[in-house]
Amino acid sequence: MTMGFRAEEKNRLIPLSQVPDLPFLPRRDGKPMAKSTPYRWASVGLGPKKIRLGTIQCGNTKCTTPRLLRKFFRQLAAAKGNGQGSAAPLKKYIRSKVEMELDREGF
């Protein structure tokens, strides 16, 4: 068990409509994420490999879990490799900061 978090916390259902409100997700230019973004991640995917966010259908609500969010972000990071050019250290720092926030929030 990672960082002592209970399994039920890692598997807590989060409606896709609430994903933009999660406090650990970075904001671009201080703007909140569009409500449609998690739906696009789940249906179309992100990046050249079209990596998709895992979802669970719960009635009429499409949901994800902290575990699936973490897996999605790790797959995106792995798809980009170690990074290239001068932006690589910054990207690594941002990835580690997101991981720390996920851990701190119990995800």
Image: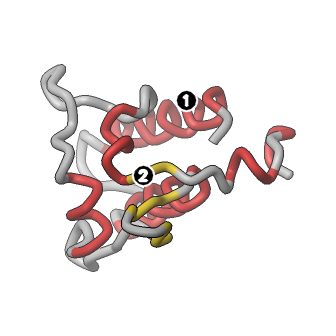
Residue that badge 1 annotates: 101
Is 12 left or right of 79, judged from the image as shown?
A: right
The residue drawn where x is 20% and y is 45% is 35
**Label 1 Cα crowd, 10 Å radius (few <14 / some 14-19 / many 20+):** some
Q: Quadrant of residue 51?
A: bottom left
Q: Position of residue 49 (x, y in %)?
A: 27, 79
Q: Is residue 106 above or below residue 75?
A: above
- Mark 1 residue type: Glu
Q: Which residue is mark 2?
A: 15
Q: Secondary structure at mark 1?
A: helix
Number of residues whose C-alpha sits closer than 10 Å to that of mark 2, classed few (under 14), some (14–19) or many (20 or more): some
Q: Secondary structure at mark 2?
A: strand
Is 82 above or below relative to 20?
A: below
Query: Which residue is nearer to you in this view: 32 or 17?
Result: 17
41 vs 103: above or below: below
The spot of residue 97 in percent (x, y) is: 49, 31
Left or right of 68 in this view: 50: left
